[in-house]
Image (spheres, grey):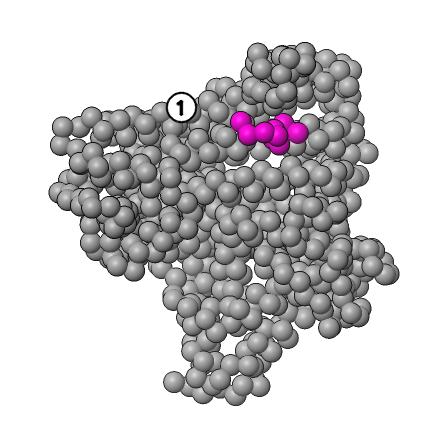
Amino acid sequence: MPSHVNEEPLTPGQLDVLLDILTHHETYAQIEDCKQSELVARWGYPFADAKGGAALAPSLEQLSLDDDNGRGLKRMEMPSPLLQTMLVQFVLPLPGVRNLPGEWWSVRAHGLVKRLADAELSESYDKGALGTRKTLATGTGAVLEMVARGVLGGLPRGPAPAVGRGLDGHYDHGRAEDLERAWDDIVQGLVYGDVVDSLFDHLAKTPDVEGHSPAAGASVDYIVMHLAGLVHHIFVGSPEGQYLLKLVENVQRLIPYKLIKQTLRIGNAATMINGMMRLLLAKLSVGSVTSRMGLSQKGDDGMNLLQRIISLTLSWDAGDFRKTADRIDKAKDRPADGALAAIRKHITEAGRSEHEAVRAASEQRGQSIVTAILDAAAAKSTSTFSLTEAQHAQCLEYYSALLSVRDRDCITASLCRQSPDLLTQAMREGVAAWEPIIRSVHTRVDLKDHLESLQGFIDDLIKVSKPRKGVDGKERLPGVDDYVDLLRRSKGLLYGFLHAIASRCPDVWQEFRGWAKASIVKFSQDDSRSSAAGSGSGSGSPDPARGSRARSSLPGRLNQLIATLNPSTRDSVLETIDAHAAYLLTMHDLSLQRLQALASKSTNAAAATPGVYLARWQGLLDDSLITPSAPHGPVRHGSDVKHSTTMGKTGAAARRPQPSPAADLGPPPPDVTAVLRALGRGFSGIVKDMSVELQAADGVA
């Protein structure tokens, strides 16, 4: 094993790889923490009540920096600093969003998230498969971690383009290397050049986005192919894909497009907004009428149209799982009634602590979750439970089906039935915050036509995503190339909408231009570039250059963290970094090959899914723990059930053609436990420090 001098700093390449490892796990860990209600209550700004009533942690206004350089930082508890920083830096300043009242965050949004956390929705471990929420949460983490790396470390300034290169150079749309180079050139121009302004100016003149420059045209192809790969992975590559498609289709059928279009035809903006609110948010139950008349005191009786759509979609879904549970309840060879009753009691009467204790016992003893439940029930009574192998499988399916029913009932209750009605209040306040923008756009743009375009695109997406019979009569899943064709056909709809806003609503367009410029500079490592975006002095004033200095300091902070390690631990960390660097290089080359297959329209284009982040997403899923399938056996992982749907599903969502082996995303990532064990806690501290500094640069602290 090679020895290293502790003071020797890591190379820029090694630091990039180290940051990749740490942000990958830190981002998803913070997303996972969102299901713990005690942490949700300590989120702080903007969810903290300014009067101290809604959250236990101080808001960022109460966080202080002892000097202008951010040294001597008084660090307070921040459960999700990365997510909070991205929210503060990119979402809160968004036009419309920045007009939301403080109570929208501290009461409405905070309350809804806390309700869902308190509901204790089920885990993939218990259900024996990678569920929909696990799939979406890991996918969100894989996307957000890329933003997080940019927020923490920034984008290094690239070398000046050679003669004949740059945005006006030549890019071959049939070569993956040229598409990637075009994207890199555009990103450099966005962060360090004037591409933001030139794109906004160009869209005000013409809807032809690709006519901006050769680099823009090639970048659009690059984006389309990667976006097609993402959509394909969601609806085809994921075992829950066809189930998600069914949810989208059910919601699409319930949306009253005809009534919405008729409302959009109303010329007066105020009347149109009022009509839309009555259509979507008015409650038409007997309880709501008697409440208005003063005959009852439940102001949140009934459900509005939006809540009815949510409730119906989830109730149809829950009905499928109830059929599975009823089938097992009535089966002649079913498990003993006492065993089924113990499972039902564990779901309906046990609390979070008992659920976690049973799950821990299952993991530690190598038992299935059902065996652990029945053992815990037997310990509290004189009953004993004996199951055949077939009955054990029935119990697993029974437990999974009942958990799925409970999840959907809890989500419906949290969003639609609990008092006060936070969802309706949040929607009303949200529309009020966006009203100036809605008025401006409605007066000058025919939104009905653009809504029709959106409706048509969603219908096309649903159609493309469904399996089709091939010439041999067998069902064939759509390929990535099918989604590329869909996006290429539909991109003009988006261009037309953006051009309509840019050319007819200059006030709105300028607001979004300002937000885009202020957001993109947050990825810059250049003090002078950041200073040009605005400067401030004193607490509460934006100082973008301060954010650039914080990002530029990250390599030094990571090297200081490495310097604290003993030689053997440092060697282990460096070996892990080298292995992960080789993995990333392999995945980049593989992604480029798949991009080339799409660009050249080769025979492998159907299975070509470019994007390293998709492999990182799959890695998170593969690492998920899953209950043993036998009464006693090793704990499984997501990689063991990657082609299995949640037990208890019926109908089309439970039947799907198996994806081609060629669709696998690549080799498994190396074990990075050595890095996480040695540096994970220290990196969390760095993230908290930098989060306060970066938000202070935005004038929040």
Q: Is residue 388 left or right of residue 345?
A: left
Mark 1 Cα-neighbour bin, 10 Å: few <14, some 14–19, many ≥20: some
Q: Is residue 238 left or right of residue 199?
A: left
Can residue 175 be seen at all in this image of the molecule?
no
Which residue is pictured at 45% across the width and 87% down the height?
3
Q: Could you tell me residue 30's position as x and y percent?
A: 53, 55
Can residue 253 be seen at all in this image of the molecule?
yes
- Residue 133, picture quadrant: top left
Which residue is pictured at 38% across the width and 52% down the height?
356
Secondary structure under tag 1 reads helix
Which residue is pictured at 29% across the width and 39% down the height?
343
Q: Could you tell me residue 556's position as x and y percent?
A: 64, 75
Say which of 400 and 535 sits in front: 400
Is residue 419 located in the magenta-colored stretch of the structure? yes
Q: Could you tell me residue 397's position as x and y percent?
A: 26, 37
- Residue 514, picture quadrant: top right
Q: Is residue 151 left or right of residue 127?
A: right
Question: Which of the image's four quarters has the N terminus?
Answer: bottom left
Say which of 410 and 621 sits in front: 410
Which amino acid, by three-letter code, is at mark 1?
Trp
Q: Is residue 446 above or below residue 393?
A: above
Could you tell me how many numbered marks the image carries? Answer: 1
Q: Could you tell me residue 54's position as x and y percent?
A: 66, 45
Q: Residue furthest front?
A: 382
Q: Which residue in the structure is indicated by mark 1?
A: 316
Say which of 635 and 244 sits in front: 635
Give, as a single range, the part of the protein colored magenta: 417-425
Is residue 144 located in the magenta-colored stretch of the structure? no
Question: Which of the image's four quarters has the C terminus?
Answer: bottom right
Q: Is residue 257 above or below residue 648?
A: above
